[in-house]
Amino acid sequence: MAACCENNEHDPKAKSVEEALEIILDTSAPLQDSEWLPLDAALDRILARDQRASSPIPAWPNSAMDGYALRAADGDVPRTVVGSSFAGHPFAGSIASGEAIRIMTGAIVPADCDTVVPQEQTERAGDTVRFISAIRAGANIRGVGEDLAPGELALAAGTQLRPSQIGVLASLGLSEIEVFRRLRVAFFSTGDELQPLGRELRAGEIYDSNRHSLLALLRRLGVEAIDLGRLPDDPERIGNTLRHAGESADVIITSGGVSVGEADYIAELLQRQGTVQFWKMNMKPGRPLAYGRIGQADFFGLPGNPVSTIVTFYQFVAPALRKRMGCRAPWTAPRLRLPCAIALKKKPGRTDFQRGQLLQTAEGLQVVPVKAQSSHILTGMAQAECFLILPADAGDLPAGSIVDVQLLEGMV
Ligand code: AMP
Ligand code: MG
């Protein structure tokens, strides 16, 4: 294979980031198989079917405030309090002209009443309630079906079940829910220098950190992560492991051995045992990235430099896995446009994914790159809260330039 070209920024044989992502997403087929789970076991899973309301929510007109339910047409005159309606304990009688009932938030508003006056706007003396301000007809009543009408779509298939979506399904009364099965993602790291954690290192050896980063990334996505361990740079062993994984996994991810060194076998093995879509990209960090298919599995050969492994995972693997898991589009993280507080160094030719931090300033949110931008300095990645995405054709950028930003974390 042609030598990769570290000194030349643009490599004409390499795919652009945009083109690569398009190919990856086009060839990532969503799962079809589903399973039923108890609702509380379905957090972060993907809904397999549209969920519609079978009855209206709310099911009854109910009070939005603690106060008094009455008929507005009687005017602002005092009312006689003839009973009460509490949440879970409706008022059983009827309410005549000049009467009101005490009512609590969430309690049914009787059919005779059309308005709730909040307690703070009333004065109570014995059985009589008077009103401090004018009564607003129709106020403070939550209408039937205001949240969902019968048959209305509550959550669409492909929705990931975050805490609020779990709440919506519970409000529909669903104790079991149909979700897509977990995507099976097998992964392993390659490199003669790699050692397991806890072992004392000899000259030239390093700990196999990538496999742990990858496991953590996969767990966050909610896939079934199949850890195939650490392999030496031995094409036969790597080839056998790839063949086996290609028979059972939906996706295979490797780290290392994907560039053009003497001990880099991944791209060659992919070519021999499967199909290669591409194996180089015009991005920084992470120029070598092999993408293709082995057996029934999609294959990602990620570069071994620890920062490149994580960046390429976030940018290419995560969107592909989201699509394959059955998630609805968009599969990529949203981009904000934010000013960069300092000048940025960049050579034209490759899309740059700089690791950055957010700055809260009086003028609003800004970003700054972290100091360590080399692809072997993992602590730089660990300091990052966001990516600064600089387009391939961009060169150095002055302070204050508006750049594309992707946040690494969302809310819980
Ligand atoms: P490679 O992609 O195999 O050429 O590796 C590029 C760099 O990443 C080398 O410095 C490797 O030692 C390092 N590296 C490869 N695999 C790992 C790993 N699993 N954990 C930490 N560093 C790695
Ligand atoms: Mg290697």
Image (cartoon, rainbow, N blue to C red):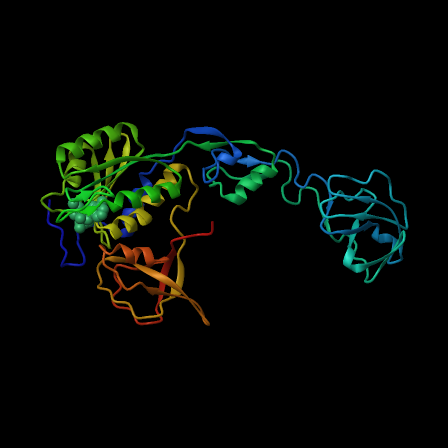
Query: Would you say residue 162 is visible in this rendering?
Result: yes
Q: In which quarter of the image is residue 169?
A: top right
Residue 177: x %, y % from top left: 52, 32
In this picture, is 48 found above or below 7? Answer: above
Of residue 215 and residue 287, the one placed in the foreground of this image is 215
In this rendering, position of residue 72 left or right of residue 390: right
Residue 183: x %, y % from top left: 37, 34
Residue 372: x %, y % from top left: 26, 61
Residue in the picture at 75% in, 53% down = 139
In this rendering, position of residue 162 left or right of residue 149: left
**Which quarter of the rendered picture does the N terminus lie within?**
top left
Of residue 334 and residue 302, the one placed in the foreground of this image is 302
Residue in the picture at 11% in, 43% down = 263
Q: Quadrant of residue 338?
A: bottom left
Residue in the picture at 36% in, 71% down = 400
Residue 359: x %, y % from top left: 40, 66
In this rendering, position of residue 201 left or right of residue 182: left
